[in-house]
Amino acid sequence: MDTTKKQVEKNIVELATFYVGDALCGMDILQIQEINKLMMMTKVPQAPEYVLGILNLRGQIVTVIDLGKKLGMGETEASPDARNVIVNSTGSSVGLLVKKIGDVVAVDMVNKEHSPANMSGIQGKYFTGVYKRDNSLIGILDIDKVLGIDE
Amino acid sequence: MNNQLHEKTDQMNMDTSIRVHVSLLNSLMTLAGELVLSRNQLLQTIASTDFHNVGVVGQRIDMITSELQEAIMLTRMQPIGNVFSKFPRVVRDLAKMLEKTVDLEIIGQDVELDKTIIEAISDPLTHLIRNSVDHGVELPSERQKIGKPASGRVVLRAFHEAGQVVIEISDDGKGLDGEALATSAVSKGLITAEHAQAMSEKEKINLIFLPGFSTAEKVTDVSGRGVGMDVVKTNLDKLGGHIDIISELNCGTTVSVKLPLTLAIIPCQIIMTGDERYAIPQVNLEELLRIPAHQIKERIERVGDAEVVRLRGNLLPLIRLADVIGIERTYFDPADNKAKADRRERISDRRGRVSPAFGSESQSIQTENVQGSGKSRSRSIADRRHSPMSALNIVVVSTGTMRYGLIVDQLLDSEEIVIKPLGIHLQGCKGYAGATIMGDGRIALILDVSNLARMAGLVALDGTDRASEVAMSAAETQRMSNERQSLLLFRSSEQEQFAVNLGLVDRIEKINRSKIEDLGGKRVMQYRGGSLPLICIHDAAMVQALADREDLLVIVFNYGSKAVGLLAVGPIDALELNVAIDNVTLKQTGIQGSAIINGHTTMLVDVPELIGSIFSEWIDDSQEFLLDGQETSFASSPEAR
């Protein structure tokens, strides 16, 4: 009995959610270093299309990626709601530009389902699964895949 | 195996701990204390809103920070002896195995280098030392045969030079054979035979750095396995170092490695293009070139579609930074301190006022001009062309083998910057070596000039060494074939310059035009009690007529028994020089050919032919004259004709 309870607790994950285009996406909050407003960026000519530029985050150089473009969901506008989600991956910091920040939700990973079969193509490979909430679905991002260099 | 393990633990120790002198540590402590005090002072000043003092405190903090930075850098500095100390053994073991006797001399163990560099050069240096012992130094018997002492000598020397550390590995062995290297490279298919032919000696020696190149005829287990010098070079390149080989056959080889003192902070030239700042490492910087706007048209030339600038007699290929990194071309408009889009195809084109974008502006300017001065198309004084700010800014950079000019919008300061690596997403951008944070918190990208050259397709530069060698030898043979000639330079019309062989000239007289008499269809003047027939070059040759001047010169030639005067105008000059005579371009009756003298195309007058064509009745006498003149005639003419 005790062990099963522990198991259940272990599967509770807090997801930070945000909107990429119109889709609600989420990722493990522990992977996020911080969330910033848009800052002045330096453009990098010849960079891949989804790279918006680099910025100086307290002496650290952070590459900013337009998550919408990277996931193939269109360009993210620089609106007042837009946020930079700074994640730490493979040693360097990367900023993900999202359209809007959502709530932090605690979810039980047991309720996670695989990405629907029709969610194929460029988007599909960046999601580890989909979490069902009562009124919405949250696509769970595989951050290592998102930040990996592909193509 | 044991040895390897030992080396590994050694390496680990090197990575994790470092020895620092206590005095240095003390000074660090003092500085840290000062920094805390200054911070308190700053907080106090801010709290008391005494803004006058903020500047003073800021200055203090600035000083302490730079001192602290220096001190921290010093803790990373390690004597190069740490690396050198293992080489005596490497050499001894190797020499024993190869049955050679080699003395290793180490100089400059105290030279200090950044810890990361010290660690990284250990392997390349070992390789170079092994190369020297294995390939460089010959067997004692061979050495004695060619009169060298039986034991070879390898010198390992470290010293400071121009803010860099130089490590030299020199041996007195057999040296590198450029020809053998070239042949080997051709047989391995690394270069083509034609390519090899067109290479300078130095380039041939540099072939040793090609990947997959090994010169050793037999592979030993020490070196000569086909991987080697290219790996050494790549490793040193990564450190920002340069490697250079000087070698003389049978006398020895010297490999010199130039390394920066530290990798963390490098001096850079900051430039601006398209509203962004970029940094160019000062190691790559040769000079900054500024071409004033009104000279751009003359100095920037085009070869095909490549733009070049003439820099002290050499052609320097130009590339535009904006083009290479694929951003919009801009120029810096001094009128409003902004970068504006540059629509010119060529640099030397004018920036037209009349363009769709500036339509209204150009209209108003034109009307202004019409009302103002009446000259509708004249350019106003405030024209960008006349502003010193609209000069063309070129950064001349070199990457060892290549040299080119990078056109940028603006040249800013030279600064010491801290290199920060770019994230993995930008690893594909080969044009940048990293990024740095500027004083205002914004980021500037650091340019990698060798990759920029590659991106711009700049490849044909390898041949420049060879080209200059060829040019030198060609000039040498020319000098040999051309005897020194004494020439008299003069003019007939104001524009055209002529020359005659000074040996033919008898006298030069200054006369007034009024002294010329026109008699019997011929021009004569009184000269030494007789009449001197006068001729002009344009009488026979198709050149411009004699200048209409009062003061004339008469160059008197002795034509057989007769004297003839050639009318000319000044300035005259006599000089002795070697010239290459072009016998084709300007050849005509009375003109033997042309040559470039003092920057002017000068026509060489063929005096016998000139006189002969005017006074055909004298032809009998001319025989004698020709014999006379043959000795002093233009040297290159007999074969060339």
Image (spheres, rainbow, N blue to C red):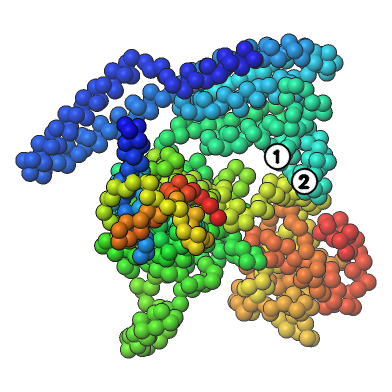
Q: Secondary structure at mark 2?
A: loop
Left or right: residue B402 compared with residue A74: right
Q: Position of residue B554 (x, y in %)?
A: 70, 69
Across the whole image, how many numbered discs are drawn on residues? 2
Q: Quadrant of residue B255?
A: top right
Q: Chain of mark 2?
A: B
Between the residue at mark 1 and the residue at mark 2, the CA separation in whole angstroms equals: 10 Å
Q: Is residue B197 above or below residue B549?
A: above
Residue at 80 percent across and 44 percent down: it is B189
Residue at 73 percent across and 37 percent down: it is B212
Is the C-beta separation of discs 1 and 2 under 8 Å?
yes
For the residue pair A54 and B127, the one nearer the viewer reads as A54
Left or right: residue A104 compared with residue B295: left
For the residue pair B267 and A74, the one nearer the viewer reads as A74
Residue at 79 percent across and 78 percent down: it is B540
Residue at 32 percent across and 60 percent down: it is A136
Left or right: residue B24 compared with residue B318: left
Crowd rating for badge 2 (residues with CA inside 10 Å; few <14, some 14–19, many 20+): some
Q: Which residue is mark 1?
A: B210
Quick check: can you spot residue A55?
no
Q: Amino acid at mark 1?
A: Leu
Of the numbered discs in the image, which one, if any, rests on residue B258? none
Q: Amino acid at mark 2?
A: Ile
Q: Is residue B412 above or below residue A23?
A: above
In the image, farthest residue toward the left? B48
Crowd rating for badge 1 (residues with CA inside 10 Å; few <14, some 14–19, many 20+): some
Q: Is residue B40 above or below residue A51?
A: above
Q: Position of residue A28 (x, y in %)?
A: 35, 46
Q: Secondary structure at mark 1?
A: loop
Of label 1 and label 2, which has the lower sequence position? Answer: 2
Q: Which residue is mark 2?
A: B191
